[in-house]
Structures are given as structure tokens and as C-alpha cells.
Amino acid sequence: MSTTNLATQVLREVAMTALHKTLGDNLNTLRGDMQGTLDEAGIERLAAKLPDGTKVGAITVSNPTPKPVITDEAAFVRLVADIAPSEVMTVQIVRPAYMKALMDEMEKRGTAEVVDPRNGEIIEAEGVEMKEARAASHSVTFEKGGRETIAAAWRAGHLDHIEGLPQLPAGSAE
């Protein structure tokens, strides 16, 4: 890959990240405002039309229905134990603190093995595998004012050469 292609690829990702966040923030604000307007007006459905009248979509209010949510697990278990005892299970779990200690030990050792506290023997930890915790990744960082500078460059048409960025219609940069 040439350094020109790499430079373009880097600029493309940074620009798209900046615009995605800006557009996402604007969309979140707009959605909140729109929901308030729809609620206030009592509107259930509203068409979206272009200036020439072409319908391009719609907004439909979805009114949530109440759903049961268990807020006290112990109380719910007592209820089920009372009305259907065969539906309550006893589950064995490892104490979280001990699990953490074993995981820390295996991480330090670099293998899925633990020391048996009864005899000091190193044994394989059944049911445990050593895996990469996460895939390699990268992050995008911005210089101070970088997001705003990218947005202004986009509005001015200076990023039109970057594939995948939406193009603003002529005259909309003002």
C-alpha cells in the first residue's frame, strides 16, 4: 500500500468518525425534540415528504405496553417455590472472589492451570482456556477543535475526494 493511500485511508476514517459523532449527536437531539412534539400534539403517524411532495418515509409513534420486570429476585423465587416448588432450582456457583483469584493466578501463569491448595500440585483447570481477551483494535483521536475543523472542511467541500462521505448539495455549505 502506498503512503498516499494510507494517508487518505487515515483521513477518511478520522473524518467519518468526526461526522458520525456530530450527526449522531444531532440526530439524538432531534429525536428527543421530535418525540416531545409528537407527544404534545397527540400525533401517531406523520409522513416525511420532499419539497415536491414525494413521500420518502414516515414517523410512527410506538406506544410501549407494560411488561413484567422482576425487581426482587428473592421474593419472586419465594413465590414460585410456594406455587410450583418443582420449578425452583438449586444452582452451585463458585464464589466470585475465589473465581477472580484463580483467574488472576492463571493470567500470571499464562496457562489454564491452578495450584491445588490441598497438596500444591499444579493441575489443568478444566473448563478454562487461555484466549485473547479482545481482538486488536485502534482508536481515533482528534486534535483540539479537530472535529469542528473536519465538519467545516466537509461543509466547504474540501473532503469531496474521500470515498464514502456523503456529499452536500451545491449551495448547502452556507
Image (cartoon, helix red, strand yellow):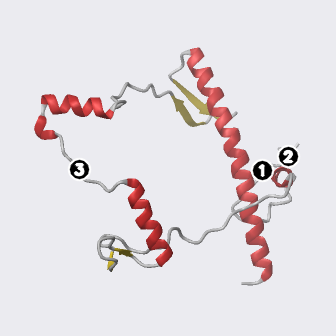
Q: Is residue 38 above or below residue 86?
A: above
Residue 101: image tag? none
Q: Is residue 16 above or below residue 40?
A: below
The type of residue carrying mark 2 is Ala
Location of the C terminus (image quadrant): top right
Per the model, the C-alpha gap separating discs 3 and 2 is: 63 Å
Residue 108 at x, y = what percent?
50, 74
Per the model, the C-alpha gap separating discs 3 and 1 is: 59 Å
Mark 2 secondary-structure assignment: loop
* 25 relative to 121 in the view: left or right: right
Tags 3 and 1 touching, CB below 8 Å: no
Residue 173: image tag? 2
Quadrant position of residue 10: bottom right
Residue 141 at x, y = what percent?
76, 60
Residue 135 at x, y = what percent?
54, 70
Q: Earlier in the sequence, mark 2 or mark 1?
A: 1
* Residue that badge 1 annotates: 168
Q: Residues within 10 Å of mark 1 (few under 14, many from 20)?
A: few
The type of residue carrying mark 3 is Val
Q: Residues within 10 Å of mark 2 (few under 14, many from 20)?
A: few
Query: Which circle, 3 or 1, is nearer the viewer?
Result: 3
* Residue that badge 3 annotates: 91
Query: Which circle, 3 or 2, is nearer the viewer?
Result: 3
Mark 3 secondary-structure assignment: loop
Location of the N terminus (image quadrant): bottom right
Tags 2 and 1 touching, CB below 8 Å: yes
